Image (spheres, rainbow, N blue to C red):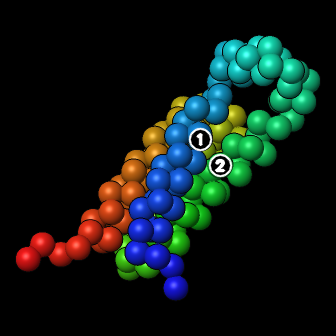
Amino acid sequence: MAQAGSAPRVASWASLAGVGALLLPKCPVCFAAYGGGLAAIGLGPAAPRLLEPLLALAVLSSFGIVAVLSARRRDLVTPLVSAAGAVLVLVGALALRRPGLGAVGAVLLMGASVLNAVRCRRAAAPAAG
């Protein structure tokens, strides 16, 4: 059985994954800026091939954590918002190459992660008597 304090820590990691999705480039100028930064630290030509899989991994990780923690609380809204964000990021940014859709998805994904963290903390807090 998991410790009582483990849910808020996992929720915090979900928030971090959402922030990571927000920080990943969503437009050609962003890709160029990130590419320059990655080249400066020695990741050069390998970086473009790694960005899309890393984005997909971050998005799916964030959604997965939100879904698992929400299921424990029997919460339906938070994982639906997270799923909508994940779909918009993956389809909008990666498949359709629409940075606006990806950005909206990243905001939804991050919002769901933060909401999930808040709800996990409230659920773990002892009842005020």
User: Which numbered circle lies on residue 21?
Assistant: 1
Q: Is residue 127 visible?
A: yes
Q: Secondary structure at mark 1?
A: helix
Q: Tell me what residue is drawn at x 47 percent, y 59 percent.
A: 9
40 displayed left or right of 10? right
Q: Tell me what residue is drawn at x 30 percent, y 71 percent.
A: 123
Question: Residue lying furthest bottom in this view?
Answer: 1
Q: Tell me what residue is drawn at x 64 percent, y 57 percent.
A: 60
From what the image shows, is residue 64 above or below residue 115? below
Q: Nearer the viewer, residue 76 or 88?
A: 76
Split into 4 quadrants, where in the image is the C terminus?
Answer: bottom left
Q: Secondary structure at mark 2?
A: helix
> Where residue 87 appears, x then y in whole percent?
59, 53
Crowd rating for badge 1 (residues with CA inside 10 Å; few <14, some 14–19, many 20+): many
Residue type at mark 1 is Ala
Residue type at mark 2 is Ala
Question: Residue lying furthest left in this view?
Answer: 129
> Where residue 119 appears, x then y in whole percent?
32, 63
Q: Tell me what residue is drawn at x 51 percent, y 61 percent.
A: 10
Q: Is residue 35 visible?
A: no
> Where residue 24 appears, x then y in whole percent?
64, 33
Question: Residue lying furthest right in this view?
Answer: 45
From what the image shows, is residue 113 above or below residue 98? below
Q: Which residue in the structure is indicated by mark 2?
A: 58
> Where residue 91 appears, x then y in whole percent?
66, 48
Mark 2 and 1 residues: CB-CB less than 8 Å, in contact?
yes
Crowd rating for badge 2 (residues with CA inside 10 Å; few <14, some 14–19, many 20+): many
Real-space Cα distance between discs 2 and 1?
6 Å
First in sequence: mark 2 vs mark 1: 1
